[in-house]
Each structure stands twice: as C-alpha cells, then as structure tokens.
C-alpha cells in the first residue's frame, strides 16, 4: 500500500491531485491518502480527511512507501519505522503554508540523503513512475540524540546550562546529525 | 568525601520534579515525545492542541489547549486563560516546549509563575528560528536550536537534535 499524508493542518491539493491522476492512469487501487480539509476530493484513490496520530502511525507501518508534505511529523515517523518516504515541500506563494520553511527542510534532508525529495509536482510525477522499486534510505531510533537528552536532564536535575558557546560554529557545518562531537564541545 | 546517606539524600531520594511538556499537534508533538526519556523519574504532564493525542501518553495526565496564534486574538485569549488555569493547578517546576505559538504562551506564563523554562526550536526551522522561537529567547532559561548554523553566542544554543 502507498500511504499519502498532508499532515494535521492544511490541505495540499497540488500533491494529492498529482498522485490521484497518476493512480487513475495506472489503475492503481493500493493508494490511501489523508488529504486534510480539502474541497477537492480524489477520484481514484481512497482517502480520509484526518487520521488520529496512532491510526496514522499504523498506516505508515503497513505501507510499502510513504508520500508526504515536508513536515517533520511525517518524516520522523517514517524514519522511525524505516519506511521509504518521498516528501514534496509546500510553497507559501501558492498559499500552501504560512512561509517557505518546508523548502529549506526538504533541501536539508535531501543533502543528508535520508529521504527522497520531489521539489514540485513534476518531480513527483517522475518519481511515481519508479515507485515500486523505491528503497528506504534512512532510519532513526525512537529517542532524541544522546547529546540533547543529556543537555535536558542536566538542566532539569542539576540546573546545569549548556554554557556559553565560545565559538559560533561555521555556517557550512554539514548538519545536525552527521557529527555531534564539535557541537558537544560547545556546551561542556 | 560524601557519606552514603548524603549521596542518597542528594540523588536517590530526590523528589520528582513536575514537568509540563507542551507542543502543538503534528511535528512539534512528535519531536517533544522523542525527548521525554530525558525526564525518566520525573512527573511529566502533557498539553497539546489535538485531543486524540491523549492516547499516545496514556500513562500521563494530558490537557487539551486551544490552538491559537497572533492572527486569532479570541483563540489566543482562550489559550491564555486555559494556560494560566493549568499552571495554577499543576504548579510545574519546569515548562518545556518545541512550539508552536501555544508552547510559547505556556513558557511565557510559566516563567511568570516561577517555573524554569526550556524551548527546543523545531528541527523544521533550518534557515531561521520560528517567530515563537525567537520570542521564546526572552523567556527560556534553556534556549535551544537543533541546527548548529543557527546557534549564536547569546543563544540559542545547539546541543544536539531530536534525530
């Protein structure tokens, strides 16, 4: 089953209609979408406006692949369950979100290579052509990084603050997860 | 050297602290839950904007709070009243949030009522902090971003990420 989700807040018709059109052309009956508060209802694929969080998690668990807006809830849940995920970012100029942070999120995670990204509906249509051979490329544990957990428990149990950052990390540091050591030195 | 009884007194029998953990439904909530193992042994109470999330933390107390932002003044007012009511009832030692606006409101009033406050800005904010994340800098005792490139000398600090 291909599971599609737009998250808890807003509709994302540009993504849903691309998938619905593709499914209709291919005669696919194995697509289920959570479409949000949308006035446009899919013709081919099965859908629900909203799913409770545990229901959404079960859908992802039983899916072979997840297609989602570039929201962190969808991305993290797919990575926790080691499911391949394709994300398509919302755009504020099309009134799909308040700002363009999903574009930045998508680019950053694309650099890390842990998820698949379709920057727009054309890229998504291309990606759909080979969807049955898609591979999972990332997985995360159920907990935050050890470094963050330690910083939080140090603060709560001993009132210990991370302390002043003496050196501002360079702007081109690869990402938050690739190497935690240099950052670790900033708070000890 | 500390005697064993002193060790027990300072660590083993420390009274559990009350932690109010707040996040809007969706990605903020997913990130909040990933940090909860840092608070094992503490008394954690949750608050979120989506009532059905109660089932994800079935062993803990859960409050539903109104979703609001600065473009919805009436909802904001209801959120403020509910927040103050929860804070007065539970008297948390610590308030922690990953956002969005409702989390900031809980930090703001939590701080006024004497709680320690923690803001962990969402990992979705890669290029700049969210609006509430910036405002939280003024009320958070521990102010964190999840991206090293957003860390600054006066905060927010970078101390790891939720993934």
Image (cartoon, rainbow, N blue to C red):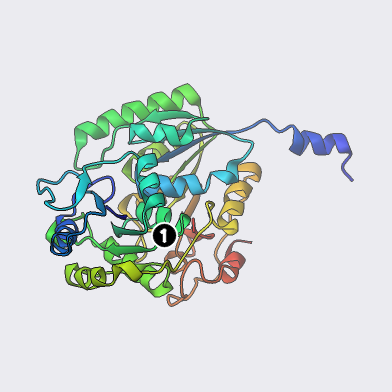
Q: Residue at x 43, y 77 (%)?
A: A172
Question: Which residue is identified by label 1?
Answer: A83
Q: How many numbered markers are drawn?
A: 1
Q: Where is residue B56 in the image (x, y as percent from the top left)?
A: 45, 37
Q: Tell me: A109 left or right of A127.
A: right
Disc 1 residue crowd, few under 14, some 14–19, many 20+, Cα 10 Å:
many
Q: Where is residue A160 in the image (x, y as percent from the top left)?
A: 63, 50
Q: Residue at x 46, y 55 (%)?
A: A81
Residue A42 appears in the figure:
yes
Q: Which residue is drawn at 39% across and 40% down?
A: A54
Q: Where is residue B131 in the image (x, y as percent from the top left)?
A: 31, 53
Q: Tell me: B70 left or right of A55.
A: left
Looking at this view, is B40 or A87 the one in front?
Answer: A87
Give the quadrant of the C terminus of chain A: bottom right
Q: Where is residue A72 in the image (x, y as percent from the top left)?
A: 37, 55
Give the quadrant of the N terminus of chain A: bottom left
Q: Is residue A174 depicted above or below B56 in this figure?
A: below
Q: What secondary structure is marked by label 1? A: loop
Residue B145 appears in the figure:
no
Looking at this view, is B148 or A138 the one in front?
Answer: A138
Q: Residue at x 64, y 36 (%)?
A: B41
Q: Is residue B107 depicted above or below A62 in this figure?
A: above
Q: Tell me: A132 left or right of B15.
A: left
């Amino acid at each position: 089953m291909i599971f599609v989700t737009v998250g808890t807040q807003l509709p994302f018709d540009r993504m849903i209609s691309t998938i619905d059109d593709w499914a209709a052309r291919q005669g696919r009956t194995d697509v289920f979408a959570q479409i949000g508060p949308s006035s446009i209802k899919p013709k081919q694929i099965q859908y629900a406006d909203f799913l409770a969080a545990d229901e959404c998690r079960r859908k992802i668990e039983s899916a072979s692949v997840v297609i989602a807006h570039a929201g962190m809830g969808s991305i993290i849940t797919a990575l926790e369950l080691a499911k391949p995920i394709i994300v398509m970012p919302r755009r504020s100029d099309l009134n799909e979100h308040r700002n363009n942070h999903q574009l930045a999120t998508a680019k950053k995670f694309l650099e890390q290579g842990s998820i698949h990204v379709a920057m727009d509906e054309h890229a998504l249509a291309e990606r759909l052509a080979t969807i049955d051979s898609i591979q999972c490329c990332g997985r995360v544990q159920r907990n935050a990084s050890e470094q963050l957990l330690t910083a939080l428990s140090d603060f709560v149990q001993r009132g210990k603050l991370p302390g002043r950052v003496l050196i501002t990390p360079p702007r081109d540091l690869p990402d938050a997860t690739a190497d935690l050591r240099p950052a670790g030195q900033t708070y000890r | 050297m500390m005697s064993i009884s002193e060790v027990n007194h300072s660590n083993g029998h420390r009274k559990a602290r009350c932690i109010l953990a707040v996040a809007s439904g969706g990605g903020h909530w997913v990130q909040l839950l990933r940090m909860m193992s840092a608070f094992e042994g503490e008394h954690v109470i949750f608050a979120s904007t989506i009532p059905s999330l109660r089932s994800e933390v079935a062993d803990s107390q859960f409050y539903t709070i109104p979703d609001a932002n600065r473009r919805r003044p009436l909802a904001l007012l209801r959120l403020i009243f509910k927040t103050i009511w929860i804070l007065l009832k539970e008297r948390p030692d610590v308030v922690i949030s990953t956002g969005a606006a409702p989390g900031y409101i809980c930090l703001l009033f939590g701080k006024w009522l004497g709680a320690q406050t923690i803001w962990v800005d969402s990992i979705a904010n890669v290029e700049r902090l969210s609006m509430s994340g910036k405002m939280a800098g003024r009320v958070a005792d521990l102010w964190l971003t999840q991206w090293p490139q957003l860390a600054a000398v006066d905060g927010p600090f970078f101390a790891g990420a939720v993934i």
